[in-house]
Amino acid sequence: MILYPAIDLKDGQCVRVLHGDLSTATVFNTEPAAQARTFVEAGFHWIHVVDLNGAVQGKAVNAPGVEAILASVSVPVQLGGGIRTLADIERWVEAGVSRIILGTVAVKDPKIVLDAAKRWPEQIAVSVDVRAGKVAVDGWTADSDLDAITVAKRFEDAGVAALIVTDIDRDGTVMGFNVEAFGAMADAVSIPVIAAGGLATVDDIVKLKARKGVPVAGAVLGRALYNGAIDPAEALGLAA
């Protein structure tokens, strides 16, 4: 299982928010690149970056912060938030992003995802962000009428590298993973699933790995990592 420490960018700073609500942001580091280096020094092999302002506005807003991260670390970076067109994707691939995360367009214009996955094989991930059973869009400011598995199945055999499934109702709460929900998605599709939203302690990693069925491929670490509830070395050891 691969662990993805999260860097969520708001107004150029590294923050954590509750349920995706930007008004709840707590600043953990004013230097995103420094935060990325800290994660690499702790032993993580990937960085998960989201442009929160960009997700809401539908365009890149925190590009300088993302570029600083890319320049400061050599590990692969996956990036989401405000990426809506093939031109947006191309820009970030050329800038050095290893995996592009597409969420809103996966609901509103899935052909962009299909075309991108053909053009950049194994470099496209789909973000399936779930609130009260339905997939949210536009930086989680609006809900669709689609359930998570319906959206995910659109991209079977499309060459998508991963599904990042976020439990919005638990995101930022440190109340624990909804292991069964993530497992149900892993069982339902052939695309590797990365779990996000609610991770509280290393016990969540243990439970995720222990469940019967198709293994969950990864997990995003957020607030629990920042507030010290999770020790990086212990988490990495359990995930390996």
Image (tube, helix red, strand yellow):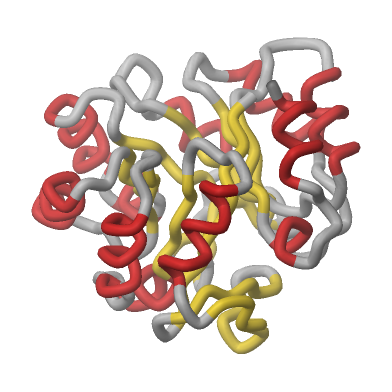
Tell me if 79 is positioned left or right of 118 in this view. right
Residue 23 in percent (x, y) is at 61, 88
Q: Please tell me in which quadrant of the rendered image residue 189 appears.
A: top right
Residue 166: x and y in percent read 62, 49
Q: Position of residue 1 (x, y in %)?
A: 64, 24
Is residue 57 something one can see in this rendering?
yes
Check the image and report above or below for 153 versus 69: above
Percent coordinates x, y for residue 49 in the rendering: 44, 57
Most distant residue in the top direction = 213
Q: Nearer the viewer, residue 201 or 197?
A: 201
- The answer to which of 145 and 103 lies nearer the viewer is 103
Left or right: residue 181 compared with residue 56? right
Relative placement, left or right, of 44 versus 19 is left
Quadrant of image for the C terminus: top right
- Judging depth in this view, the residue of 159 and 44 nearest the camera is 44
Residue at screen point 41% across, 66% down: 33
Q: Residue at x 81, y 51 (%)?
A: 230
